[in-house]
């Protein structure tokens, strides 16, 4: 389980706000409800992240069995909903601080956006050689180019 920087910042903001309130008013009885409420600002995102990671992990065996190896240039809207496996190099990482990372993964045939809706099991950074298991989806609900909705992204060695 990972706690994002945004979650920690919100938690700390409210802790400071609570401390200022208690010091200015002297009302310590408010701590009986403010401290547990502030703790929930950490516990709820952690619990949601844990449940999301557990759900994704349960899907990995099915994707490993059904996913077809494809090159990035072969991925298009005709493959919508198909489980795929791609291998490539991570060129960019976006939104990792929100536990909803997006990766720009490239192989020798092209590059594609890989979106994950939970934090991955491994810390994946620029330059890592990875294997991605996921499903082809449209970038936006009704329109857009093909992207990969990632179920699993893991580092692999360069010689594979």
Image (cartoon, rainbow, N blue to C red):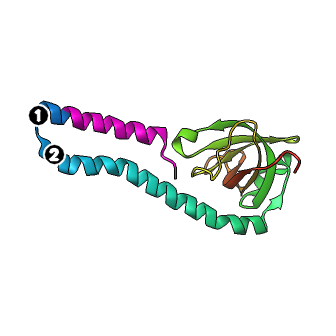
Residue 85, horizontal then vertical, whole percent: 79, 56
10 magenta-colored: yes
* Mark closest to the chain's N terminus, 1 or 2: 1
Where is residue 109, by image quadrant? top right
Counting labels gives 2
Circles 1 and 2, Cβ within 8 Å, touching? The answer is yes
Residue 83, image quadrant:
bottom right
Left or right: where does residue 37 sit relative to residue 101? left
Secondary structure under tag 1 reads helix
Instruction: Judge from the rendering whether residue 52 lies leftward or rightward of residue 91; answer left or right.
Output: left
Main secondary structure type of the part rendered in magenta: helix
C-alpha separation, residue under disc 1 versus residue under disc 2: 10 Å
- Say if 123 sits above or below 82 in the image: above
Provide the secondary structure element on which disc 2 rests.
helix
* Percent coordinates x, y for residue 126 in the rendering: 71, 36
- Locate residue 73, reporting x and y percent: 85, 46
Q: Is residue 126 left or right of residue 56?
A: right
Q: Which mark is residue 144?
A: none
| Label 1, residues with CA under 10 Å away: few <14, some 14-19, many ≥20 | few
Quadrant for residue 68, please give it: bottom right
Q: Name the residue beneath numbered marker 1.
A: 25
Q: Which residue is mark 2?
A: 30
- Can I make out residue 153 in this image? yes
Mark 2, other Cα within 10 Å: few <14 / some 14–19 / many ≥20: few
Range shown magenta: 1-20
């Amino acid at each position: 389980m990972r706690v994002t920087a945004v979650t920690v910042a919100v938690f700390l903001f409210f802790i400071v706000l609570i401390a200022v309130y208690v010091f200015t008013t002297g009302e310590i009885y408010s701590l009986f409800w403010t401290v547990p409420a502030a703790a929930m600002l950490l516990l709820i995102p952690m619990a949601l992240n844990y449940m999301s990671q557990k759900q994704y992990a349960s899907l990995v065996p099915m994707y490993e069995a059904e996913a077809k190896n494809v090159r990035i240039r072969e991925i298009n809207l005709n493959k919508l909903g198909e489980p795929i496996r791609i291998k490539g190099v991570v060129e960019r990482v976006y939104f990792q601080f929100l536990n909803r990372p997006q990766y720009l993964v490239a192989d020798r045939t092209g590059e594609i956006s890989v979106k994950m809706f939970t934090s991955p099991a491994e810390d994946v950074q620029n330059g890592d050689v990875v294997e991605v298991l996921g499903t082809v989806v449209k970038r936006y609900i009704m329109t857009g180019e093909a992207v990969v909705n990632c179920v699993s992204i893991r580092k692999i060695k360069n010689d594979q």
